[in-house]
Amino acid sequence: MASIRQLIQTSPARSNELFAKLLDTSEGAVKTRQRLLQDLKEELGLLAQLEEQHLFPVLRKHKEMKELVRDAMNDNRQTKRLLADLEETPVDSEEFAKKASDLRRVFQQHVRDDRKELLPAIVKVLTDEEAQAVVETIEAERTEIEEARRAEAEQHRSEARRAQEPAERQASAEAADAIRANADAVLNAAGRATASVRDDSERVTRALGLAVQETSKVVRQASAEMGVLGQSGEAVRSGFQQLSREWVELVQTRLQSNFDDMITVAQSRTLPELIAAQGKLVRHNMELMIDNAQRLLRRSMRIGDAAKEPLADNERRSQRA
């Protein structure tokens, strides 16, 4: 339990801390200044209330203390007037900082007066029992008031959270609906793009199949004519060798492209990124398949042309004979 001396010396500590924080703010820190000003108002009011209710009535019983008590009461009234004036001043103005500084100067002067004049007189006129009773009463009421303030603040926070929850749930639901709609749109767009590319690839594949069938037909026709086989066979064999080498190169190119695209898929962190990476993988595969099919188609057509030339020459010779 603190002594009356310790009580008077340490009571202003919280107020001085709030003054320092308040004067350290800028004009743009409006909400911070408002919060600190409210805390300061409560602390200064509590100090005055505890003195006037529990200390001053005990001191008035001693005639030699009446003038000191009157001076202390005047100090409290002056502090209240300056604080009320500060509350009326816009917190984002230069005048606010000046008035806050004036209030701190007056308050600290009152504290010095209490320590220099009031405290020695209290120690002199009050017995140890009287002084200790004052300390216990003041500390008990301070604790009770502070606990009540904390409970009230917690209740206000709980009410604010409850009032905010419906709005937060609504916002969360709207956000979830928007995300779901965007995902559906991306998936649908990816599906349409994939279907379009697939249709293109199927058309090219059919064309390639027809070209291969035509090439095989020409080769079979050339083989059936024994006199021409020696002339066309070398060209056909050379063409198929080139076709085989080109096919291997195309497969290697496709494998490398797939490898790069799969790395992009693996590094995706969100649903839109994953969908975009998968769409890129599908698109690149389709584009490579179409390109490869076209190249092989052209190569097959050249093989067919090479096989047809001896047949055409043979037919022209037969016509001249």
Image: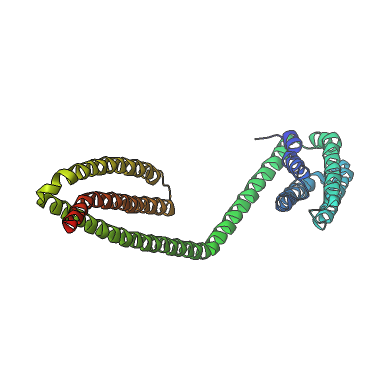
Residue 195 or 157: which is nearer the viewer? 195
Numbered label tally: 0
Query: Is 179 in front, or is 290?
Result: 290
Compared to residue 164, the image places residue 63 above or below, namely above
Residue 6 occupies quadrant: top right
Q: x, y percentage for residue 267?
A: 41, 43
* Front one among 261 and 134: 261
Q: Quadrant of residue 64 in the image?
A: top right
Q: Looking at the picture, does residue 228 appear above or below residue 201? A: above
Residue 281 position within the rendered picture, expressed as x and y whole percent measured from the top left: 36, 50
Q: Residue at x 53, y 65 (%)?
A: 167
3 lies above or below 23: above
Quadrant for the N terminus, please.
Answer: top right
As drawn, the residue found furthest toward the front would be 321
Residue 119: where, in percent of width, then height?
81, 36
Q: Is residue 226 left or right of residue 320?
A: left
Q: Quadrant of the C terminus?
A: bottom left
Image point 78% across, 37% down: which residue?
126
Residue found 26% across the figure and 56% down from its top: 208
Residue 272: percent from left, percent from top: 43, 54
Relative vertical location of residue 78 with respect to residue 259 in this rendering, above or below: below
Decide if residue 210 is on the left or right side of residue 287: left
